[in-house]
């Protein structure tokens, strides 16, 4: 298992670790996930995203190339701006997600979600034929930290880091740390891209300034409470952006052609979506297993994709068919011989 430069720091903090994309990353700290969630919701939680690979695309044709590959409007981005995109196949099915930032007139840097650098290179190198585009992928430096919570901005400013004002905007600090405004939890927050020689000190400085350690258990609880899908946990090989409820965030419907555009635009215009991700409250404290069936009137209408304990509640995200979309609807969840009761709730936050 691969480890980040912060691995020794996490071990010293007695964090329990998990594996994501082959990387050892904190699952929970000794104070417990419930405490981590509360501290992040009231202040700011600091999470090591060493499992997030990065990519750089640069050259005279990089802008046009990115605009033709990804779902959002890359052509219009200026240095200091960025947005979120999906990577889709020709049938509009989601293959991965990325946050892409314009770092120069002909240069873009992306943070990948749900795919690694090797996959990205293998997928998109074949499209670079006559284009003047240079691709650089990395599973290591720069490293990614995310600071999520209402006090994230003030904490960053207290350690001398800049804070961009608009979502997707980013600023490169004098110390070589790029700060991007990025909400991963519904609480507001920022991502940081850091060189190896800065990550340990910056991590320590942020904790000393009031940030609290955040593991993936508490991080998942926050995003599930706010109805935020995570790729590929909440999707599969047939998922569409509308089904993941990320279409407004990752798509621009006024740009030129891109991979999967025909299918995605047709769904958006006609509004013909049969299923989508929805938040649920589960009765009791026991969480159903991932993949458990959701049943309405003795018919399967979906399945559970994510679960978490949050604020004393058992929560879940589920991909549900249209007949099960009404808020407050009571549903049955089944797995093997066990049964849970759940209620659809579109206002968990």
Image (spheres, rainbow, N blue to C red):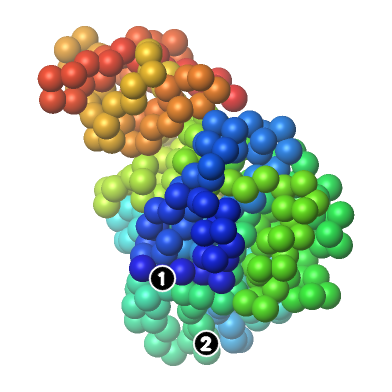
Among the 4 quarters of the image, the one containing residue 303: top left
Mark 2, secondary structure of its residue: strand
In the picture provided, is 154 more to the left or to the right than 85?
right
107 or 221, which is in the foreground?
Answer: 221
Q: Residue at x 40, y 53 (%)?
A: 18
Neighbourhood count class around disc 1 (C-alpha, 10 Å): few under 14, some 14–19, many 20 upward: some
User: What whole-number distance in Å separates the C-alpha atoms at marks 2 and 1?
Assistant: 27 Å
From this view, report whether residue 285 is shown above or below residue 242.
Answer: above
Q: Is residue 223 among the parts visible in the rendering?
A: no
> If the image is split into quadrants, where does the N terminus sit?
bottom left
The residue to which callout 2 is attached is 134
Residue 287 vs 81, above or below: the answer is: above
Mark 2 or 1: in front is: 1
The reply to whether residue 194 is visible in this rendering is yes
The tag earlier along the polypeptide, 2 or 1, is 1
Residue 281 placed where, x, y %?
Answer: 43, 19
Which residue occupies 42% across, 83% down? 128
Give the camera-side residue of 55 and 53.
53
Placement of 145 over or under 287, stated as above or below: below
Residue at image location 50% in from the left, 83% down from the top? 135
Residue position marked by numbered label 1 in the rendering: 2
Q: Nearer the viewer, residue 262 or 143?
A: 143
Tell me where residue 331 appears, x and y as whole percent: 31, 14
Q: Is residue 87 left or right of residue 209?
A: left
Report whether 167 appears left or right of 71: right
Question: Going 18% across and 25% down the picture, which residue do you hit?
Answer: 335
Quarter assignment of residue 168: bottom right
Q: Nearer the viewer, residue 318 or 155?
A: 155
| Residue 76 vertical placement versus 127 (above, below) | above
Q: Secondary structure at mark 1?
A: loop
């Amino acid at each position: 298992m691969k480890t980040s430069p912060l691995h020794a720091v996490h071990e010293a903090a007695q964090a329990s670790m998990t594996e994501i994309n082959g990387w050892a990353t904190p699952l929970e700290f000794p104070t417990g996930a419930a405490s981590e969630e509360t501290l992040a919701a009231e202040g700011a939680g600091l999470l090591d995203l060493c499992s997030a690979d990065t990519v750089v695309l640069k050259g005279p044709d990089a802008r046009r190339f990115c605009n033709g590959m990804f779902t959002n409007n890359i052509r219009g981005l200026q240095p200091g701006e960025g947005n979120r995109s999906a990577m889709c196949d020709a049938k509009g099915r989601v293959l991965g997600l990325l946050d892409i930032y314009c770092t120069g007139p002909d240069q873009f840097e992306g943070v990948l979600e749900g795919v690694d650098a090797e996959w990205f290179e293998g997928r998109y190198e074949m499209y670079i034929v006559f284009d003047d585009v240079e691709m650089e992928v990395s599973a290591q430096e720069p490293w990614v930290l995310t600071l999520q919570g209402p006090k994230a901005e003030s904490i960053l400013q207290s350690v001398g880091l800049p804070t961009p004002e608009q979502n997707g905007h980013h600023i490169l600090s004098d110390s070589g740390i790029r700060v991007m405004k990025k909400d991963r939890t519904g609480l507001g927050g920022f991502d940081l891209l850091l060189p190896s020689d800065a990550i340990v000190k910056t991590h320590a400085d942020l904790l000393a300034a009031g940030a609290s350690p955040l593991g993936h258990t508490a991080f998942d609880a926050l995003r599930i409470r706010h109805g935020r899908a995570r790729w590929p946990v909440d999707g599969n090989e047939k998922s569409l952006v509308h089904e993941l409820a990320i279409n407004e965030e990752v798509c621009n419907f006024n740009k030129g052609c891109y991979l999967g555009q025909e299918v995605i635009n047709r769904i958006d215009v006609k509004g013909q979506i049969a299923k989508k991700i929805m938040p649920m409250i589960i009765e009791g404290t026991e969480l159903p297993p991932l993949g458990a069936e959701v049943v309405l009137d003795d018919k399967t209408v979906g399945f559970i994709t994510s679960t978490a304990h949050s604020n004393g509640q058992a929560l879940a995200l589920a991909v549900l068919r249209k007949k099960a979309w009404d808020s407050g609807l009571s549903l049955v969840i089944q797995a093997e011989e066990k049964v849970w009761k759940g209620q659809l709730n579109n206002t968990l936050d």
